Amino acid sequence: MEVIIQPTEEAAVKLTARIMADQLRARPDMVFGLATGATMEAVYAELARMCREEALDFSNAKSFNLDEYIGLPAEDKNSYRYYMDHHLFNNINIKKSNTHLPNGMTDDIPGEGPRYEAAIKAAGGIDLQLLGIGQDGHIGFNEPLSSLSSRTRDKSLTPVTYRQNSIYFNPPESMPRRAFTMGVGTILDAKRIVMLVTGKRKADIVAKAIEGPITSMISATAIQMHPHVVVILDEAAAANLKEQEYYRWTFANEPCWDRYR
Ligand code: GLP
């Protein structure tokens, strides 16, 4: 794992988008794993800008999102399909048919996970998985006690997640209590993982995720087992990391980061 601390949220977002864009330029038929949440909005705005102004070409790319609420149709403003269309897919030249999210409206809930897994496999697997982190340490919607080898499935959300996300719903009580999510095992199968974490409110949980013991109580700790992970933070989110000096040293000295400094 590499940890990169950027001076501001804007710099952290730009670095994340640049890494994604460089991978896409190197491999135009990239399969992206994508995340939702407020943190990612600026990343998607930056990718859209690059598509518009720098000819970043998504025409051969594919995407699979981490998760989707159960019971929300695509037109619902709180569905992750709506979020992705609005923040990214409508603003870049990706083919809509190449963008995938679990179907929150399926009438075959047990069948949806295996169907989604099969679609990821048929696409050749995920090349780069973008991740955020929830307040309770979840990745996707892998809430505490999610098996570290879990696959895509339906999952009940925790009260913490309910409090974090219901602010977007009107009324808040209309937020679904359940969601489909890629499993921790599904996420770990991605060839590369980029996690972006910004803001003071995430400082405690991200320190546990990066430097704490691996535990299913905090599914984000599972990224410690992945061979190719970079975690990008702003100063506020990095505040509780013990080994900051080491992380800064590595970023300053590793040749692979030369072009990003
Ligand atoms: C949701 C998503 C997660 C995301 C989290 C963080 O719970 N399922 O994938 O990481 O939100 O959201 P925010 O960026 O708004 O803090």
Image (cartoon, helix red, strand yellow):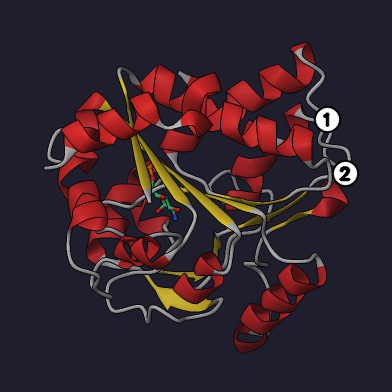
Q: Is residue 93 found left or right of 188 in the rendered image? A: right
The spot of residue 229 in percent (x, y) is 45, 51
Label drawn at residue 229 = none
- Disc 1 under 8 Å from ligand 1? The reply is no
Q: Is residue 242 found left or right of 152 in the rendered image? A: left
Secondary structure under badge 2? loop
Whole-angstrom CA distance, mark 1 to mark 2, is 8 Å
- Disc 2 under 8 Å from ligand 1? The reply is no
Residue shown at 64% from the left, 42% from the top? 84
The spot of residue 21 in percent (x, y) is 67, 31
Residue shown at 15% from the left, 46% from the top? 204
Which residue is identified by label 1? 57
Q: Quadrant of residue 53?
A: top right
The spot of residue 82 in percent (x, y) is 64, 45
Specify whether residue 259 is in view. yes
Of residue 138 and residue 24, the one placed in the foreground of this image is 24
Specify whether residue 169 is in view. no
Seen in the picture, residue 2 relative to 124 is either above or below; the reply is above
Residue shown at 28% from the left, 58% from the top? 137
Q: Is residue 6 found left or right of 154 in the rendered image? A: left
Secondary structure under badge 1? loop
Residue shown at 69% from the left, 24% from the top? 48
Seen in the picture, residue 60 relative to 99 is either above or below; the reply is above
Tell me which amino acid carries mark 1: Asp
Tell me which amino acid carries mark 2: Asn
Which residue is identified by label 2? 60
User: How packed is label 2: few (under 14 Cα within 10 Å), some, or many (20 or more)?
Assistant: some
The spot of residue 4 in percent (x, y) is 35, 33
Quadrant assignment for the C terminus: top left
**Is there CB contact under 8 Å for labels 1 and 2?**
yes
Of residue 23 and residue 104, the one placed in the foreground of this image is 23
